[in-house]
Image (cartoon, grey):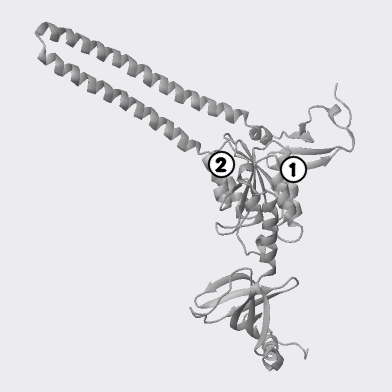
Amino acid sequence: MSNVISVSQFNTYVHNIFLSEELLINIQLYGEVSGVSYSGNNVYFSIKDENAVLNCVKFGLRSDEYMAKEGEMVLVRGSPNYYVKGGRFSFNVSKIESYGQGVLYKQFLELKNKLEALGLFDQSKKRPLPSNIRRVGVVSSETGAVIQDIIDITHRRNPMLDIVLYPAKVQGIGAEATIIAGIKALDNINVDVIIVARGGGSQEDLSTFNNESLAMAIAESKKPVISAVGHETDFTIADFVADLRAPTPSAAAELVAVDVVKLTQTMQSNAQRLLRLFSNIFEINKEKISGLAVRLNSSAESLLTNEVQSLKTLWSAVSTAGIINIKNMLHNFDLLAQKLENLNPVRILRLGYSQTSKNGSIISSINDVIKGDELVINVCDGIINATVTDKGKKEK
């Protein structure tokens, strides 16, 4: 075929089109900065408006040159370029100037001010986390590292803690709706706290969490909500509205999971310190009594010796009883931990059982439902939504 050409021939042809177009040489564009990253003295970023995004690169950025931050509006001068080897289009920037505040950042500030005026950021309204968290609801993507990190950290610190995931989109069109649905679903089941989580990204990636409807869903939740969105330096509207902000999803996992291993070690350490304290008190008083005995006559010394022996006998009995009580306490603690594990509802669910509820109430009989009812079925690794189509017959 005569019209077949190689990839390098095609890319070179496209590259030469841009080089030969004089109207595209040294032009000026304006847009909002997004996704800034550095490689040596080169800076890569995008400029965008409401309808389009353009990849840009500034080679050899000097320390005295202006470089806009995320969300700022800039005016860039340069020329388009098609990179032959990589087959990528970009705008090569020769100069960057400030062009006012970015549209998205303005929208962020306007929404922040509006919700703050409504009292949604008021610290006095923040709900404290429960002291004994046994079940945690998580709204996040079911794939990726975020949910796996949360599961790994919580189970390492407290193996008895139950995690319920509501899989949701955390980026793109419709993401806000799935996150809101997740918060409402978890708010109506037996969880102690809800974590809304996603990994890091650009301000554009995190814009899902700068949504007014999502902010209202967090504020209206009956359960405490932890926002764990992005990295430590990232802030979203969800962070301000939530009852608690965690700098990362991993940090959120540490907040909800008490480290039972450290707790046990602390109890054992305190028991040993108590024994040492008793021993030191006895030794101090024994020396005082012994010193007094030397200064008294033989009859008094004999009497004091008997008293010292009585003290030793008493101390031996007290120490033995104390050690036995402490060992009994630790043994009872182990028995209680085992009992809790045996009663763990997740363990029962893993055997194939499930828990069915309607409007937050547990279904225990076929007479509790009618055709058309919406049901929530809890299984060991998530939630199943179902609709009653036929009740069947009640067993005799």
The residue pinned by badge 1 equals: 185
Identify the mark at residue 155; answer none if there is no mark. Answer: 2
In the rendered structure, the answer to whether residue 365 lies left or right of residue 285 reads right
**Does residue 179 appear left or right of residue 389 in this picture?**
left
Identity of the residue drawn at 57% across and 46% down? 253
Among the two numbered marks 2 and 1 on one chain, the one whose residue lies closer to the N terminus: 2
Quadrant including the C terminus: top right
Give how far apart the Cα atoms at labels 2 and 1 are.
23 Å
Residue at the location (64% across, 49% down)?
Answer: 121
Q: Residue 316 occupies which quadrant of the picture?
A: top left
Percent x, y for residue 240?
63, 52
- Secondary structure of the residue carrying numbered label 2: helix
Which residue is located at x 55 percent, y 78 percent?
Answer: 66
Looking at this view, is 222 or 170 the one in front?
A: 222
Question: Percent from the top left, x then y, of residue 285?
Answer: 23, 20
Q: Nearer the viewer, residue 192 or 296?
A: 296
Q: Is residue 171 above or below residue 77?
A: above
- Alpha-carbon neighbours of circle 2 within 10 Å: few (<14), some, or many (≥20)? some
